[in-house]
Image: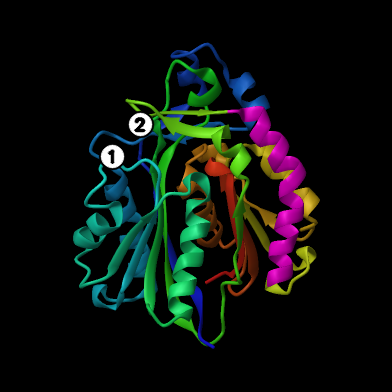
Amino acid sequence: MIGSRILALGHYQPSRVLTNDELAGMVDTDDAWIRSRVGIRTRHVAAPEETVDAMAAAAAEKALAAAGLATTDIDLVLVATCTATDRSPNTAARVAASLGLAAPATMDINVVCAGFTHALATADHAIRAGSATNALVIGAEKFTDVVDWTDRSTCVLVGDGAAAAVVTASPEPGISPVLWGSVPEMGNAVRIEGTPARFSQEGQTVYRWATTQLPAIARKVCDRAGLHPEELAGVVLHQANLRIIEPVAERIGAVNAVVARDVVDSGNTSAASVPLALAKLVERREVPAGAPVLLFAFGGNLSYAGQVVRIP
């Protein structure tokens, strides 16, 4: 049976960097308070012209160039985002038009922070089913558009950016079966609601769920990949909070893995956080080619999804 693998990655972040000290001039907070509670040092903030689709296209263009594929080779574009301003055309269609792709299927996937891992699984399924051969899978968010800059409990968390993966058919699968699901009764724990839309969350509720329930679910992801956690070379969790990432990675039992901590420099970029962190691990060669890395994301709805991928 044909499977799929990640052929190449690319990422994009705005040049504007917002530090904790700058935030302290905008809202009642300080660097020590932010670092002690979420571990974030800086975050990137998009300019008005840096739209979600523009950032997605920039990341996808880099991934496509790294993959060595032509624009005519891409037959599926999936964009994971929850911050696109417009309903139609969707972000994926705008990315396809921007890159000059021939005639791909184009879909947006809104699973908030778990969007990329859901989209990656969807691309894998499409390729396994024979509906696609080469897919662009993108996580892109402009979360600073939906944050209340007077609310120190949320404005210190978020950042903007995008990252993309080129996923291709392969006789040797490099993406394991996904484990995904949700906790419907906790669906209101993370929200982007209202006019204008604003991000809010029940931080302690999400923290307790993630630190107590997520490790066991992540170990089941490893089971589906036929691996023990100690065989993992890397762990890329949703970059929500360093106080979640570090204890969860430890409880998974991935004792030999490099743990992504991009949240320190990028903040919480929602659906972009997992591919951003993964792309940077690959770019810095912190994990060798072919090595297994756990991807696991969770967030709004309260949804989650994870798989083990082989590094391109």
- Label 2 residue SS: helix
| Residue 226 falls within the magenta-colored stretch | no
Image coordinates for residue 112, horizontal then vertical, percent: 47, 45
Judged from this view, the residue extending furthest toward the front is: 185
Give the residue type that dot 2 points to.
Asp
Residue at 52%, 58% in the rendered image: 117
Q: Is residue 232 visible?
A: no
Q: Is residue 170 depicted above or below 106 in this figure? A: below
Residue at left offset 62%, top offset 39%: 185
Q: Quadrant of the N terminus?
A: bottom right
What colouring method underlies this structural image? rainbow
Q: CA distance from mark 2 to mark 1?
A: 9 Å
Q: Nearer the viewer, residue 123 or 248?
A: 123
Question: Count the marks: how many?
Answer: 2
Q: Which residue is mark 1?
A: 85
Residue 247 placement, left or right of 159:
right
63 with respect to 215 (left or right): left
Query: Residue 71's x, y, as percent?
Result: 25, 72
Question: Badge 2 local density, few (<14 within 10 Å), some, or many (20+)?
Answer: many
The percent position of residue 292, horizontal first and vertical second, equals 65, 69
Query: Residue 244's quadrant in the figure?
Result: top right
Residue drawn at point x = 58 percent, y = 21 percent = 31
Q: Which mark is residue 145?
A: 2
Query: In terms of secondary structure, where does tag 1 sit?
Result: loop
Q: Which mark is residue 264?
A: none
| Residue type at numbered disc 1 | Thr
Above/below status of 179 relative to 183: below
Query: CB of mark 2 within 8 Å of CB of mark 1?
Result: yes
Image-based side of 87 in relation to 14, left or right: left
Instruction: Look at the image and give the residue range highlighted in magenta.
Output: 202-224
